[in-house]
Image (spheres, rainbow, N blue to C red):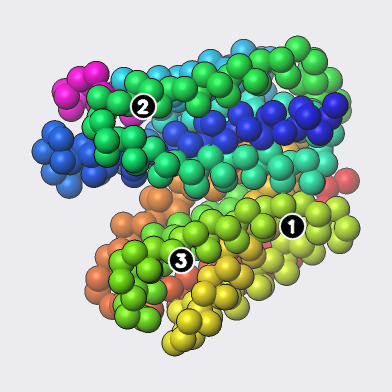
Amino acid sequence: MKRLQTTLLSTGHGSVDLYQGIVPVLVPFLAAERGYDYLAISGFVLAATLLSSVVQPLFGLLTDRWSMSWLIPASMIASGLGVALIGLSSSYPFTLAAIGLTGIGVAAYHPQAARTARAVTGGSHIGMSWFSLGGNLGFAVAPAAGPLLAYSGLAATPLLIVPAVAGAAITVPLLRSGGAARLRTRDLLGVNDWPSFRTLTAIIILRSVAYVGLSTFLSLYVGQRLHLSTGASATTLFVLFGGGVIGTLLGGRLATRFGRLPTMRWSYAVAAFALAGVALVPTVALFAFVALSAVALYMPFSLHITLGQDYLPTRVGTASGVTLGLAVSAGGVAAPALAAAAQASSLQLVLTTLALLPALSCLLTLRLREPA
């Protein structure tokens, strides 16, 4: 029964994070059909990324104060509704507000959903890795909306609400188990370790910048390095996403056997080595380093969530909002600075520099201790 609940919750997570990854898919269609320039388009990306990252911890505070299980299906519908509304008007303020609604929906979902996942899985590392995997897969399959939009244009966006409705439908039965209430009673007895949580937050930010920087420039760099066509170099993203799936599941299993902190330390040490290989290896062998980078950077992903929740046992919603909110958004905020650095120097230098971030994360893990 618990395995089924975890699977359904993971599927629902994927239906939400699909909308977190869909804005970049919409960008070329918004530019082509409505003539938006780069500045206007950057407003959409900013609304989706920053709004989600800023508001998410606020929803975490709210879920720590009140039981808000209803927020899970409501936020799912809001995420899908925002995208669905985009095709109904060509007004820029309306489109910006619609994308903002999606960002708020995504932000509202994660803290309460992570609390529920903790209750359903009993804090299991493997269970939380499955919950995290759902979100990662949802983000990765967002480009599948491209063919629909290419065929019908932005007028087809109302159809994109279907995953949100389906996700809400399969998640609602999980909310009747009372797991969140049991979690709240147990966690009230804990003691918060804010210094360790701040260190963990710094580690998450460094990991986010490294991964988003890699995923942003990887196809372009591989194309230049190996003299590949655009289509061929784009296949490296499939290697990256596939490695992320393996890493997410592997992290939970290794943490169960060896412990969270040792798993995190070795993951970040391997990630630093692999990122250096991506930047410096001049042959097709760099594809192996891409896969190794993805596996290593995703192994700690679900462990951040459980560790943050254990450091703040009376503030599980807040911990979830921060650990999940910064996982993507911190890298998104840093992306323009990385692009400027690449423009001023080279992509190879930027990717080499990114290898220093997981190395620093590895060192920071030495300051952490397993919660009592």
Residue 215, compared with residue 191, is above or below; it is below
Q: Is residue 59 visible?
A: no
Answer whether labels 3 and 2 touch (C-beta < 8 Å). no
First in sequence, mark 3 or 2: give its number.
Answer: 2
Q: Which mark's residue is nearer the viewer, 3 or 1?
A: 3
Disc 3 marks a residue whose amino acid type is Thr
Q: How many marks?
A: 3
Q: Residues within 10 Å of mark 2 (few under 14, many from 20)?
A: many
Q: Is 249 left or right of 278, judged from the image as shown?
A: right
Q: Residue at x 11, y 38 (%)?
A: 35
Residue 211, compared with residue 354, is above or below; it is above
Q: Residue furthest bottom?
A: 282
Q: Residues within 10 Å of mark 1 (few under 14, many from 20)?
A: many
Residue tagged by mark 1?
250
- Measuring from the top left, give residue 117's x and y in whole percent: 73, 31
Q: Residue at x 76, y 27 (%)?
A: 5
Q: Is residue 162 visible?
A: yes
Q: Which mark's residue is nearer the viewer, 3 or 2?
A: 3
Residue tagged by mark 2?
83
Q: Quadrant of the N terminus?
A: top right
Residue 2, compared with residue 179, is above or below; it is below
- Chief SS of the magenta region: helix
First in sequence, mark 1 or 2: give its number.
Answer: 2
The magenta stretch is: 86-99
- Measuring from the top left, give residue 330's x and y in whole percent: 46, 50
Q: Is residue 88 magenta?
A: yes
